[in-house]
Every structure is written in structure tokens, then in C-alpha cells.
Amino acid sequence: MLTRTILQTRNARREAFTLIELLVVISIISLLISILLPSLSRAREQAKSVHCLARLREFGTAIATYENISQGVLPPARWYPSVADLDLGTRTTPIPPGQSIPTVQYGWMELLFTHIYGELVRVAEDFPVQRNFEGDRWQEYFICKAAGDDGVTSGHYRVYLPSWSAGTYLLGAGGRYSDLAKANPDKPSRRERIRPKMPLIGDANIDSERGDGAGNDDSSFIDAGEADYAGSNGRTNGNRFSDRHYGGTNFLFQDLHAEWNTRLRRELAVDFDLNSVEDISILP
């Protein structure tokens, strides 16, 4: 009987882990986690970038179908919905009694969404899809998953106005562009008029918002020379494209293909129409 008890005690000791063995196992698990976590993080970021490119391709398909009903013209980068199409109860700032609603500016995104889904975007705010409203399908549709959410900031997508409104720029002295050479966002172009390899839409910087109220910045489009400059809204990076995807930007191009690019954002800030001629510096 005593012998059996001794054997059982020895077997129990063999089945248990020593403190050193536990520490070794914990160390191995910690090492594996430290190796795998960066890979998992990269995989998540890669998935966001792929999703962003897929969304830009969807925009390209929507643009192509829109052109079929607009005689080949792109949607306007800026347009004004009628008051009948707005829900005044959605305004963040109520309209005082007796006052009429101010002019509300919408962008290409609201128009494309309405074209795709047949649903009106009725929020009575300027460029509402750039305002991170919650609980609406249209607001989710135009947000890049890598952009995050910072209240009124616009880490979404914006059109590149030198392409989108090609032919509406005025040349300055000597036939060169100046800081007054702004395009007309109300007048979109036809894609056949746009220089090949020019971007139509790109990742918007998350620090960009509506601007200073003087029309210098805009959350629906980026004007000439602004692709790599800070805007006038006081945010750090301002009104420009974003390089949030592994140091590069996702673009939709003139031929409606989407591509990741690490150099184009800065190239556009120097030669914003990509004609191999360095344009005059345009400050925001």
C-alpha cells in the first residue's frame, strides 16, 4: 500500500510543470506574439489599401455609367441641390425663424451616390459626405477604411480639379499658371479632353476640412498646386492628397483604372498638369 502511494506521488510530480518550464513556455509564446503582431498589422493595412482601390474602381464604374446619361460629361465637382431635396432638420446649426436656408454646396460624391443607388442625399450641409455623419449608407460609402474618423475632417476621397474641370483654367502672364489660375468646379470636363495618366480621384488628407470660409479650401476637390501643400484651414497638412497607404496614395486615373503611387502626389504639386513643364509655385 505504501509502495503504491509513493508511485502515485512520483507520477503526479512527473505530470506537473516546474516553474522553469512554465517560464520557458511563456517566453516562447511572447516571442511568437511579438513576431506575428507586426505581420498581422501589415495584413490589416494591406487589406484596407486593397479595399480602397476596389472602392475607387467602383467609382470608375459609376462614372462610366453616369457618362452614358450625361453625353460623356463627368459629374460636377460642385453643385447646388434644390431646397426641396434637402432635409432641413439635419442641419447642425438650426435656421432662425424667418430666414431662408443659405445656398448648400454638394459635390460629385452626392451625385454619384444618387446615380448608383437612386437615393437622395438630403443633409442640408455643405458636402455632407465629407462630414462623417453616422448611420447613413452614403457616408460609409465614401470613407476610406484607413482614414479614421475625426469629426468634421475629410479623410475620404477628392477629385483632382485640373483633370476634372480640364479646360476651365485661365492662364496668367506669359502663358503660365499663377495663383489666380483656378478652375471652375461647377463645369466638369469630358474624359477625352483630359491628359492620359492624369488622376481623377485620390485619397483625401484626413486633416483637410471645409476650409476658412473664403473658398480657398474645399473638401470635395483639390485645386492646382494643392496636391502637396497645407491648406488655409489651420490644420497641419491641409488641403492635399494623402499618402496613408504605405507612404503612397491610391488614385483613380483618366482611363478609370485604380493604382497605388508613391511619387505622383509631389509631382502634381510641381507640375500639376503633368506636361513636363514646372509650373509656377501656387500657394494655397
Image (tube, rainbow, N blue to C red):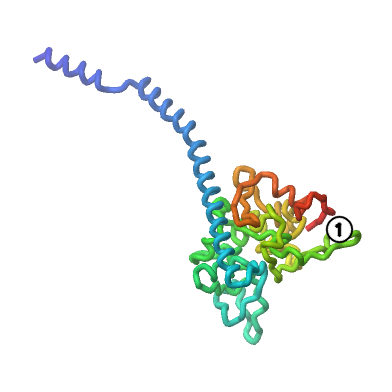
Whether residue 43 is situated above or below residue 92 in the rendered picture: above
Q: Residue furthest bottom?
A: 98
> Hey, which quadrant is residue 164 in on the image?
bottom right
Whether residue 274 is situated above or below residue 33 in the rendered picture: below
Q: Nearer the viewer, residue 190 or 59?
A: 190
Q: Residue furthest left?
A: 1
Where residue 115 appears, x then y in whole percent?
54, 70
Q: Could you tell me the amino acid type at mark 1?
A: Arg
On the question of residue 197 being in view, the answer is yes
Residue located 52% across and 65% down the image: 138
The N terminus is located in which quarter?
top left
Could you say whether the residue bearing mark 1 is in a helix, strand or loop?
A: loop
Q: For the image shown, how many numbered marks are present on the structure?
A: 1
Q: Residue furthest top?
A: 3
Where residue 188 appears, x then y in whole percent?
69, 68
Whether residue 269 is situated above or below residue 33 in the rendered picture: below
On the question of residue 107 being in view, the answer is no
Residue located 67% across and 57% down the image: 208
Neighbor class of circle 1 (other Cα within 10 Å; few <14, some 14-19, many 20+) is few
Residue located 50% across and 36% down the image: 39
Q: Nearer the viewer, residue 231 or 19?
A: 231
Question: In this figure, which residue is indicated by the disc labeled 1?
Answer: 176
Q: Is residue 272 left or right of residue 242?
A: right
